[in-house]
Image (cartoon, rainbow, N blue to C red):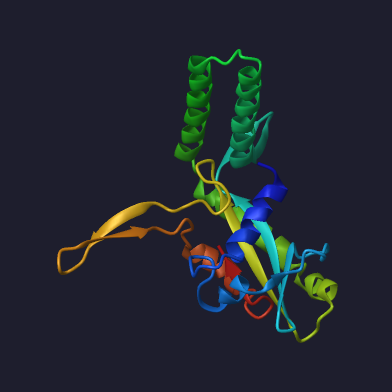
Amino acid sequence: MGKEKFEDICVQNLSAKHFGKYVSGKLKVFSTARCCTEFTESPDFLFEKNNEYYGVEHFVIDLLYKEQEGVQRSGSRLADSGIWEIYKHHHGALIKNQFDAKIAAKDLEKAIQEMADLVAKFNYAQYMDEFKRIVEKHAGKVGKYYENIQQPGKTKIYFLIEERNPFSGAFGKGIDYFVRRRDGALIKRTSPQTILTVEMMQVLKKYIGKIEGVIF
């Protein structure tokens, strides 16, 4: 799935008409604000409501990495590419009436195992280095975002941070679990996809005042 498709999904989630995970609290404005599709500068998205402007800079921070040719590369992107290549190959075979379900299943099983191996090798310190580097990189451009929008005093900037891992797409669903109420009833809950650690909050809090908020 390409960058444009992921960003389309992000806009859809921000603009969702229901009051779900991505439109709670002050983020409810995104459910009725107009997405300014004519805006092509940075930040990535611009919304407008009642002559107030909401700039959203979307960026990805990978949870997993894989060494390839001596370089640490995004494990999430490599996994996405691998699954996409499997689909294209076997879809082409299907069109030519040469599809073999057993071979397709083996290819998919191998890809899933490789993803599971990456998860098992998760390195939190490496992830935090990337988190800090990428957040600081975008925070350094906030002044430029305000300039590009050209609406002084009417603009708020948000960061939309997507943590990617091979087992979720853009804003993948969290894990469902059940809790028991005092009256004995079981209630289904969904865990958040993103867990904020103290170290992550320390990185983000430095930019309070420069940006309006951070969306995960």
Placement of 200 over or under 121, stated as above or below: below
Residue 200 position within the rendered picture, expressed as x and y whole percent measured from the top left: 54, 63
Pick the front one: 146 or 71: 146
Pick the front one: 145 or 35: 35
Left or right placement of residue 49 versus residue 39 in this view = left
Q: Residue lying furthest bottom in this view?
A: 153
Residue 27 position within the rendered picture, expressed as x and y whole percent measured from the top left: 57, 74
Q: Residue at point 67% right, 57% down?
A: 59
Left or right placement of residue 88 versus residue 169 in this view = right
Query: Where does the N terminus fall, quadrant-wise?
Result: top right
The image quadrant of residue 209 is: bottom right
Q: Residue at point 66% right, 74% down?
A: 33
Residue 160 position within the rendered picture, expressed as x and y whole percent measured from the top left: 63, 63
Left or right placement of residue 93 versus residue 102 in this view = right
Q: Residue at point 81% right, 66% down?
A: 39
| Number of numbered discs | 0
Query: Where does the C terminus fall, quadrant-wise?
Result: bottom right
Q: Residue at point 76% right, 65% down?
A: 43
Residue 210 position within the rendered picture, expressed as x and y whole percent measured from the top left: 69, 77
Q: Residue lying furthest left in this view?
A: 183
Pick the front one: 126 or 105: 105
Placement of 71 over or under 50, stated as above or below: above
Left or right placement of residue 175 versus residue 18 in this view = left
